[in-house]
Amino acid sequence: MIRRRLAVMVLVVLQVILLATASVAAAARWTSLSLPGGTYTLLVMGSDMGPYRSGTVFDGRADTLQLIVIDESRTKVTIVSFPRDTWVPVRGRGNARINELLRPGPEAAMGTIQDLTGLTVDDWIVTTFAGFIFGIDDFGGVNVDVETRLNNTGTGSGADRVVLEPGPQLLEGREALGYSRDRKSRPGGDFGRTAAAGTMLQSLHRDLIERAESPVDLVQFVAALRSNTESSLSTDRLLRLASLAVSIDPDDVVQVTVPGRAGMAGSASVVFMSDSAQQIFAELRQHGSMPAHR
Amino acid sequence: MRAVTGHRADRSVRLVTITRGGRQHAVLRMLVGTVVALLLVGCAPSAAKIADVPTNLKPTAPPEPDPVAGVVTLTVESVSNTRPLGLGSARAADDEAIQGAVDAIAAWLDRHLDLLQRGGDGALADIAADGLADPDGHATTALASADRHVASAAYLVTVLHDGAPQLAAVEVTVVHRDGGTAAAELLFAVDGGEPVLTLFGPRKDQA
């Protein structure tokens, strides 16, 4: 029985590898222009407003905040994940938790990240709880290797509510939202949740490579993205970005969580960035990638 | 204005089509394109001309290719789905702008294929983004040449709009006079109403 299971697992793994290889090979035969030169950065924000809570996408706090950095060679990607309670100067708000950066508007949000990291932010994209759920469902779900048992049956908006067993599985939109937001089931609390949001992006990247077998397949991805987000990305740039994403090896995508320590700012429980955070930003400014990549 | 066949996918249809049936939908569309193109071969003027050539004449120069007039099948999908973002109602499609973009793409494809079958390099430079070339010939030499005249062509066009057209994906299927077929997929960004070829490659079943 064990041998049989092992054989099935090996077959599944081989199939996944073959599919991914075939798609990357297909992508290599597509012809498109790349993004303009230099390091490219995209600010990805998840707003806690919109349907399921009152207000619009721009009224909310950016509880999920990721900076995607693509190096000049267009082969290495770093996902920088910011814990939402990180205490920093926020444009238009003074010193505040970093998740306040969206409220003065997305352009100001880009400015806040530029001030913090010294990196030029090229584009922004933002969604809501509902946008994320619909987007994942439009995409056909997302395959995630759940790292630990998640069991959050709490109250509130319900966005964090999730019950998942560990292991690889296909998540639908609502489960994917719970996976990305749950901090009560994870040992690292908010740091664990921040890392999970980065893992979610990596998982979406792997699935995109597997599913985009031809240029027209990219249209379904673009439709899912456009329908459920607001962004500064022109259609042309979005297509170039999608095409580039399919050509990048998932092993060349790394995720780093901005390091920090818990503390208090007045009566507010916050996270102060560690000095090592500046080393991460310096690496990205200088090389567009992390040392482990090079 | 070019006659088209097609349908609109409203929000609810689009969700079902794209999420769960996306791959089957794409395969079905490919099959439809191929079948349409093959059916058109039977009624293409060039087919009749070839059959009517008397056999007792001395060999003459190869027949001139007929002008290409591809058949368009259009699907329109809205990406103006602002409700999940709390931003209100979706924007209505600008039908005139969408039709204008589709007409421009079809007219370019007709001209492009015609130039190729007359031994030229096609008209890629007229519509491609600056710097976009075709070293592998997917959008040019694979589709037609002086040795492979076009008997019929089918263009399956999907337009994404947020009111104004944003993106057009085209699956081109060409049937040659010798019965062979060729296909390619082309993606156009439509900014300011003007289609710009941004990405192309072989069709899924040829990749």
Image (cartoon, rainbow, N blue to C red):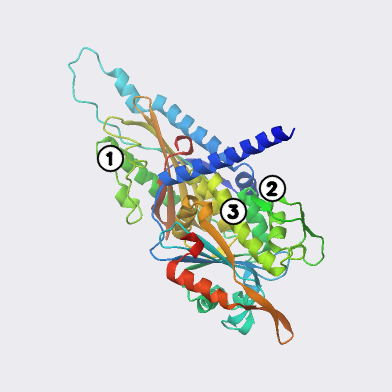
Marks 1 and 2: same chain? no
User: Which amino acid does the dot numbered 1 rest on?
Assistant: Leu
Chain name for mark 3: A
Secondary element under disc 3, as helix, strand or loop, is: helix
Specify the label residue A288 is tagged with.
none
Q: Where residue A52 sits in the image (x, y, percent)?
A: 73, 64
Residue picked out by circle 2: A169
Q: Is residue B81 in view from this perspective?
A: no
Q: Are marks 1 and 2 in contact (CB under 8 Å)?
A: no
**The one of B128 and A263 positioned closer to us in this rendering:** A263
**The one of A242 and A16 positioned closer to us in this rendering:** A16
The residue carrying pointer 1 sits among few (fewer than 14), some (14 to 19) or many (20 or more) residues within 10 Å by Cα, namely many
Q: Is residue A276 above or below residue B5?
A: below
Residue picked out by circle 1: B115
Chain name for mark 1: B
Estimate the spatial distance between the alpha carbons at disc 1 and disc 2, rounded to whole Å.
51 Å
The residue carrying pointer 2 sits among few (fewer than 14), some (14 to 19) or many (20 or more) residues within 10 Å by Cα, namely some
Marks 1 and 3: same chain? no
Residue picked out by circle 3: A204
Estimate the spatial distance between the alpha carbons at disc 3 and disc 2, rounded to whole Å.
13 Å
B107 sits left or right of A19 in the view: left
User: Which amino acid does the dot numbered 2 rest on?
Assistant: Gln
Q: Is residue B109 above or below residue B167?
A: above
Q: Where residue B62 sits in the image (x, y, percent)?
A: 22, 26
